[in-house]
Image: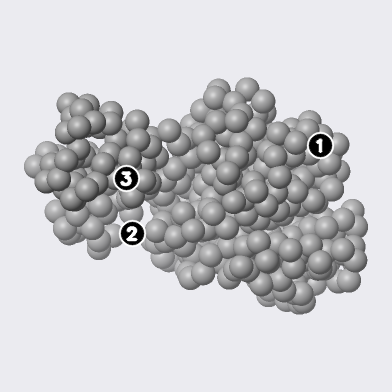
């Protein structure tokens, strides 16, 4: 085995992914890693040699059938087995099965981080020149809050994700749709036959009459805290430990880095939400802050919305497989029918929600009188397990394609 020194930003899943191992294998060789919530810079990990996926060709199979079975491109299968000619793919031969995301920009390499987001946005903008990438503002810790825009149409749609820190899986799910949308516009791959586009229509035509604005990670400081924890050198170390009730594990953290729940920050009966929550100071969840829009992240999102005057917004959260479409009977009359269409596309439930205020969707409906939706993807406990990523990303894809088709 070789030794690896843990670097800043490393997690078990990220290290395992980098060395083409499973997290369980890494833990088996480093059992102490399972007893602490986070890896610490400078720790040594023992890394066994990685093993490629291999397959023994069965009777009657050919290269095309094998590629389809494993969901990889035929060219990728041939490239991974370059010493085998087409006629050498015969019964009993052992071949290597390549990873099924060779040409895919947005993918999980362990927990999806702020650094992953920046890298993927740069790659998407480079590959697809019609994509616009920028920043709507900065977080408490000075991180840019990126946006991505596709289309110049007069109809403006907005979607955001990772408002809550431990709901970070929503970010790659939303970004995967962006990549698929861009591929469809570009005419590459087989997306023209993808079920979501059959349902929604031509991606090129959608782009011509729609401007899609996406803020994929509203709360980058919180996401980093959930995924990596903090060291004593962090400027808010002692405060964060106190707000987290002494826990060293921050995976239950929803708030931003100042302990403010960003989805309780908007000026829509904010005072009532404060009374309902009962939180008087910073906490890992449910503290609405000292005033509406006191946090730079929520203020940046509100400013973007005021400036662009969106026709519809969606805020992607987890979990519950539910779609909330109303707010104090201020929503337009068509909101319920649209929510039912979204529910039909995703398999989620359209829910008329009461007893909740100060959310982004609530404020948008109250302020503009236009349709707004909060979508709770997935089922389970946050952070949702990475094994659910493909299923949830497919559901988000259907959701977004349906929205664009209206």
Q: Residue sitting at 87 percent across and 56 percent down?
A: 370
Q: Is residue 185 left or right of residue 103?
A: right
Label 2 or label 1, whichever lies nearer to me, is 1
Q: Which mark is residue 289?
A: none
Q: CA distance from mark 2 to mark 1?
A: 47 Å
Q: Is residue 364 visible?
A: yes
Q: Is residue 196 left or right of residue 157?
A: left
State which tag comes first along the sequence, 2 or 1: 2
In depth, the one of 30 and 387 nearer the eye is 387
Q: CA distance from mark 3 to mark 1?
A: 40 Å
Q: Is residue 283 visible?
A: no
Q: Which mark is residue 37?
A: 2
**Where the N terminus falls, by quadrant?**
top left
- The structure's colour scheme is one colour
Other residues around mark 2 within 10 Å, as few (<14) / some (14–19) / many (≥20): some
Residue at mark 1: 209
Other residues around mark 1 within 10 Å, as few (<14) / some (14–19) / many (≥20): some
Q: Is residue 242 left or right of residue 46?
A: right
Q: CA distance from mark 3 to mark 2?
A: 43 Å
Q: Is residue 176 left or right of residue 289?
A: left
């Amino acid at each position: 085995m070789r030794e690896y020194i843990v670097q800043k930003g490393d997690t078990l899943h990220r290290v395992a992914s980098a060395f083409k191992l499973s997290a369980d294998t890494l833990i088996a060789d480093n059992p102490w890693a399972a007893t602490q919530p986070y890896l610490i810079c400078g720790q040594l990990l023992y890394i066994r040699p990685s093993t490629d996926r291999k397959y023994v060709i069965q009777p009657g199979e050919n290269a095309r059938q094998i590629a389809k079975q494993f969901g990889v491109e035929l060219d990728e299968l041939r490239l991974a087995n370059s010493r085998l000619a087409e006629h050498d793919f015969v019964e009993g031969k052992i071949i290597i099965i390549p990873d099924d995301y060779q040409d895919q920009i947005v993918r999980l390499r362990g927990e999806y981080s702020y650094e992953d987001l920046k890298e993927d946005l740069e790659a998407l903008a480079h590959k697809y020149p019609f994509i616009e990438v920028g920043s709507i503002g900065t977080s408490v810790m000075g991180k840019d809050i990126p946006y991505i825009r596709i289309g110049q149409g007069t109809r403006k749609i907005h979607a955001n994700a990772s408002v809550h820190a431990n709901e970070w899986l929503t970010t790659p799910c939303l970004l995967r749709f962006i990549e698929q949308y861009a591929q469809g516009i570009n005419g590459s791959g087989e997306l023209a036959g993808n079920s979501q586009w059959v349902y929604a229509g031509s991606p090129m035509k959608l782009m011509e009459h729609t401007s899609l604005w996406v803020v994929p990670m509203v709360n980058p400081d919180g996401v980093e805290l959930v995924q990596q924890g903090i060291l004593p050198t962090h400027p808010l170390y002692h405060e964060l430990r106190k707000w987290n009730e002494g826990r060293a594990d921050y995976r239950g953290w929803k708030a931003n880095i100042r302990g403010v729940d960003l989805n309780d920050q908007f000026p829509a009966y904010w005072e009532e939400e404060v009374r309902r929550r009962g939180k008087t100071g910073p906490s890992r969840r449910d503290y609405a802050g000292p005033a509406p829009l006191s946090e730079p992240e929520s203020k940046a999102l509100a400013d973007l919305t005021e400036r662009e005057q969106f026709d519809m917004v969606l805020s992607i959260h987890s979990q519950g497989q539910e779609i909330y479409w109303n707010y104090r009977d201020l929503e337009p009359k068509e909101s319920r029918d649209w929510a039912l269409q979204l529910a039909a596309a995703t398999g989620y439930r359209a829910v008329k929600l009461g007893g909740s205020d100060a959310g982004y969707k609530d404020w948008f409906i109250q302020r503009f009188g236009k349709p707004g939706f909060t979508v709770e993807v997935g089922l389970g406990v946050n952070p949702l397990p990475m094994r659910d990523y493909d299923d949830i990303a497919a559901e988000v894809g259907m959701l977004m394609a349906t929205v664009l088709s209206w």
